Image: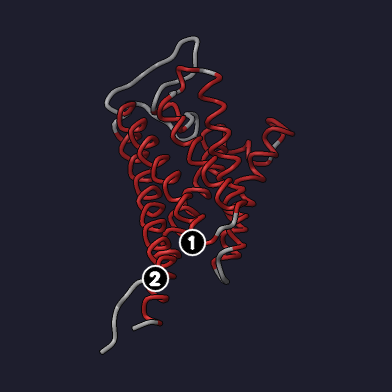
Amino acid sequence: MKLNTARPAEVYHNAAGALLFIAGVIIILGIITAEALYPGYSTLQNMISDLGATMPPHSVIVEPSATIFNLTMIISGLCMIVSSGLIHRAFGTASVTATLVLSGTGVLGVGVFPGNYGNIHAIFALLAFFFGGLAAMMSYKVVSSPFRYFSLALGAIALGDLLLYYILGQGSPFAILSMGGLERWIAYPVVLWITGFGGYLMGHAQAGAEDIL
């Protein structure tokens, strides 16, 4: 009789993957919902974080979009932070763990400190963007092809857009998309990677479990 006994590493893969997949799905659907309920919202002109609150001195908070967006960021950030601990138990790769936990902390902070908090919000947003892109690139150490190359590409797009904006400002080739589009080309590659990485880990756990059936 064959026993279906999951090994600890596979349990960590499955749990971490599920949390990351949940985070990615919640971010996408939460943003879509908040945008749909925000009168006059423009993905071209508005920053993503405007859904929670616009920057001072004349901050605007629109409900229920603000509550939806902030809760989305808080829940997703917590999922990412917890998953990073599980990923460390599974792989023990410090660069992946550190970048993912810092990105998750940034996402959490974006929800706890919306745009009306000014510089505090901006710092957490930068953490989420920069370390999210870096985490995607670092994950090449623990994933196999072809997802390894997709991860590198998505991380490079996010970091490239971010760095070009900080170096060139409106001279960045992404500036043609205005601030709303430019920011989405930083954020969405990371969100896509988070969702894909979650699916990869769950699939990896399943493959491992089948090996011991």
Image vertical order of residue 26 relative to residue 212, above or below: above
> At numbered mark 2, what does the secondary structure look like: helix, strand or loop?
loop
Q: Position of residue 202 (x, y in %)?
A: 39, 65
Which quadrant would the C terminus be assigned to in this image? Answer: bottom left
| CA–CA distance in space, label 1 to label 2 | 11 Å
Determine whether label 1 and label 2 are within 8 Å by CB.
no
Position of the N terminus by quadrant: bottom left
Q: Is residue 182 left or right of residue 72?
A: right
In the displayed structure, does residue 58 sit left or right of residue 169?
A: left
What colouring style does the render use? secondary structure
Tell me, for residue 7, which label it has, or none. Answer: 2
* In the depicted structure, whether residue 178 falls above or below residue 7: above
Q: Secondary structure at mark 1?
A: helix
**Amino acid type assigned to the residue bearing label 2 in the image:** Arg
Q: Position of residue 26 (x, y in %)?
A: 34, 45
Amino acid type, mark 1: Ala
Q: Nearer the viewer, residue 2 or 13?
A: 2
> For residue 148, what is the image quadrant?
bottom right
In front here: 69 or 208?
Answer: 208
Q: Earlier in the sequence, mark 1 or mark 2?
A: 2
Which residue carries the number 1 mark? 90
The vertical placement of 42 against 91, above or below, is: above
Image location of residue 171, percent across then percent down:
72, 34
**Residue at 37% in and 39% down:** 31
Residue pushed farthest top?
A: 57
Residue under the point 74% across and 34% down:
167
